[in-house]
Image: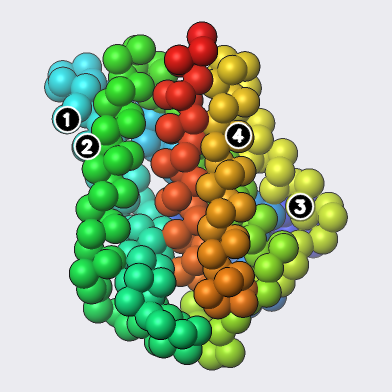
Amino acid sequence: MTTMRYQFELFFTALGFFTRLPVPAWVPWSPQRLNHAARFFPLVGWVVGAIGAASYLAFVQVLPPTLAVLLSMAVTIRATGAFHEDGWADACDGLGGGWDRLQVLAIMKDSRIGSYGTAGLVLMLLAKAAALVELAARGDLQVAFALLAAHPLSRLASTSLIHTMQYVREDESAKSKPLARRLSATELVVAAVFGLAPLALLAPAEALAALTATAAATLWAARVFARRLGGYTGDCLGAAQQGSELACYLGILAAWNFI
């Protein structure tokens, strides 16, 4: 097996795990391969961001920007199977309703959504929609570029938690258990390149503000997870992706006050 073919297989492994998009039938799957596929998590963000951007640009040709934003969000949620939104809701329920570590973990594992999860999910989706609508005031390409930058960058944020924190669930059947391995230096560089490169689509001030806001959101999330859980779970990774994606949009908007 050539090294290049193996890298393609790892990418498709990541794409198949983190989205509902079809992958080639010749791609083998194993927990070990998924273990090494985290390096391509930000590259999956390229695909999801491209789907969102293309959807928005298509919808906005015939619909008002607000509806185009909402439909674009719906398309990306369908493409990912609400994978990260589910993690955000579970994390809101667990961290909001749990008193101690074991209770938080038990609530997060429950497939039902509670009051904290419902409120958190609604507010997150509303905030992202409002931010993208505000971005649309500067032009349709601004929305497209923001989507193309935020999806990879936010997935790099989640990948950084895998590298820097301990996985805390002991359940071997947990869906994210195969990802619970620190990245090697090479893998981390690959993830960073794919996560940071799309920032070149933004103006320098916007890129700096987006990166700063995303880093701040990620550090805050890591602090909360460390204090409440002693590490991260799969739901924490989804929550970090959602929070840092929103932070990226807010950073771009904040930068406009200084441009």
Q: In this view, does 133 lie to the left or right of 178?
A: left
- The residue that appears at 67% across and 74% down in the rendered structure is 166
Work out whether residue 160 or residue 50 is closer to the camera in this orientation and state it. 160
On residue 170, the disc is none
- Which disc number belongs to residue 70? 2
Give the alpha-carbon distance from disc 2 to disc 1, as whole Å: 5 Å
- Return the disc, 4 or 2, that comes first in the chain's sequence: 2
The kind of residue on which mark 4 rests is Leu
Disc nearer the start of the sequence (1/4): 1
**Residue at figure coordinates x 55%, y 77% from the top left:** 229
Residue appearing at x 23%, y 73% in the figure: 114
* In front: label 4 or label 2: 4
Tell me the SS state at disc 4: helix
Q: Which residue position holds label 4?
A: 211
Label 1 crowd bin: few (<14), some (14–19), many (20+), radius 10 Å: some
- The residue under label 3 is 188
Numbered tag placed on residue 67 in the rendering? 1
Do we see residue 104 in this rendering?
yes
Residue type marked 1: Leu
The mark nearer the N terminus, 3 or 2, is 2
Left or right of 209? Residue 91 is: left
